[in-house]
Image (cartoon, rainbow, N blue to C red):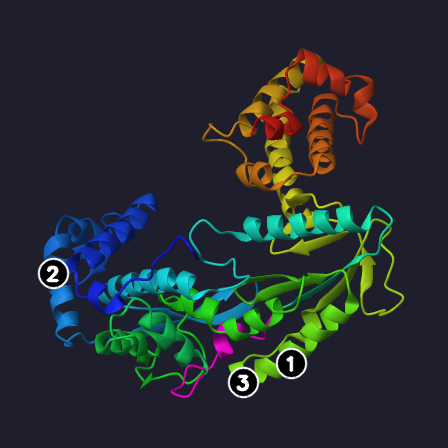
Amino acid sequence: MADLAPVDIEQKIANPDTYEDTILKIFAKKRLRGMAYGEAANGVTYFSTASGRQDLARAIAKTVAGGEYKTQTVGLWILETKGKRRAAHSPEYVDHVVGSALAGLLTHNAQCYGMPGVYSYLPHTTNVSAARGLAKYVRAHRQSAGPRGGPLYVLQSDFEHYGDNLPVGPDAALWPILRAVAALGSPSGTAGPNTLSLLTALTRPVVRDSEGSEFNRLRGLPMGTPLVPILSNLAVVPMDRAILDIDGIFYARYNDDFLIAHPELEALHEADKRIDSLTAGLGVKRKMTKERRTALSGNGQTSQQDPAYRGANRIDYIGLSVTHAGTTAVAPHRLRRFVARIATRIDGMAPALHPLPVRTRARHLVDATNVMLDLTNQFAAPGLSSLLDSTTDRGILKDVDFRIARKIVQAATGKPGVLGFRTLAPSLLYRDLNLTSIVQLRNLH
């Protein structure tokens, strides 16, 4: 990035200030989770590490600078989520501090090195940034082609077991990239010996399983350790660059999920060739079963030139949706979850309000709903901030407003569907009872 200058990592990891900052950041995160007095290591609390950070930081910096720092084995445990089992690793506290500091320095230099099209795990960059970038590209295409112009072709794909299968052995394609990033900012033009030693030890830590066996991985990132995000971002940078070399193409990658868009099918076919020519050498493989090809347009027609590109009027990507008009919104499943949270609270209140007159019931329900739609209130509905930040499609916001109003009316009147609007019209809810409108909230946001 033009406004960033690389740092000399070898010099930074010998500086106690590097670790002081990291110790404080770790403590701040633990405090937010109510774990300030939890054990960091050997009976020492996170609060104690923050209080004694100067001495701890000096001790770490001294051993690192002297080439004496030795990482500890990391514990291996199995994380089960949504029916999937994944290996997770738990490093010792000091290794976590050193790894976090090194990850921050590598991330800084990696931004100088260039990670084209990458939106994951970077400062001030999120999945919303990727969606906004795609939306801007869609709007530019629409303006150029006109409302009746051709579709925008979009390819969405990811990698099979990216974190679990990525090669990390001595001859892995990842190492030349890591060494190049680590060398940026070095007066000698090469990564220092202590930097390389830490990179190797933290990327391929000695893992101890539940039976006490110890081993090093040849494949798979040490999930749960601090370097994983930056390793994930850098591992396929050659592919990122090859795709973006195609004239006029849009490309976004968030960890292992990537998206390519272009108004010409030939550009997508060329992208396919370049991906296939590089993935084997990088040690990754596309997950073809999850791959989606879309002809994005207002009419939603499948491409006649390549039927693999199915017609659609929106693209769902990493939790967000981008329409053919270039507007954005949270993905449909997240919208349903947001409305369901509000509906559940309304249903929970309704029985207690049953003895009251219908309009009084409605007033109480509106007041409670307004609390859920107040970003400054601790009882605001989860997901409200994300909805307002990422949604520019006013039609979707109007639909959410309608669904919330309908639920209030159903709970107040006891009538199903929209029959209750005959008793409590939407205009009454908004004008007389002052129900908060999400559309208006977005306009003010």
Viewer-nearest residue: 417 or 337: 337
Looking at the picture, does residue 231 appear above or below residue 408? Answer: below
Q: Position of residue 104 (x, y in %)?
A: 33, 60
**Looking at the image, which residue is at 56% across and 39% down?**
389
Residue extent of the magenta highlight: 158-172
Amino acid at circle 2? Arg
Where's the C terminus, which quadrant?
top right
Magenta highlight: main SS? loop
The quarter of the picture where residue 83 lies is bottom right
Q: Position of residue 256 (x, y in %)?
A: 55, 67
Camera sees residue 71 = no
Within 10 angstroms of label 1, few (less than 14), some, or many (20 or more) residues? Answer: some
Q: Earlier in the sequence, mark 1 or mark 3?
A: 1
**Looking at the image, which residue is at 62% across and 23% down?**
436
Q: Which mark is residue 276?
A: 1
Within 10 angstroms of label 2, few (less than 14), some, or many (20 or more) residues? Answer: some
Looking at the picture, does residue 52 appear above or below residue 73? Answer: above
Residue receiving disc 2: 58
Residue receiving disc 3: 281
Amino acid at circle 1? Asp
**Looking at the image, which residue is at 33% across and 62% down?**
6
Secondary structure state at the residue bearing disc 3: helix
Residue occupying the far bottom of the picture: 171
Looking at the picture, does residue 425 appear above or below residue 265? Answer: above
Q: Is residue 423 left or right of residue 381?
A: right
Q: Earlier in the sequence, mark 2 or mark 1?
A: 2
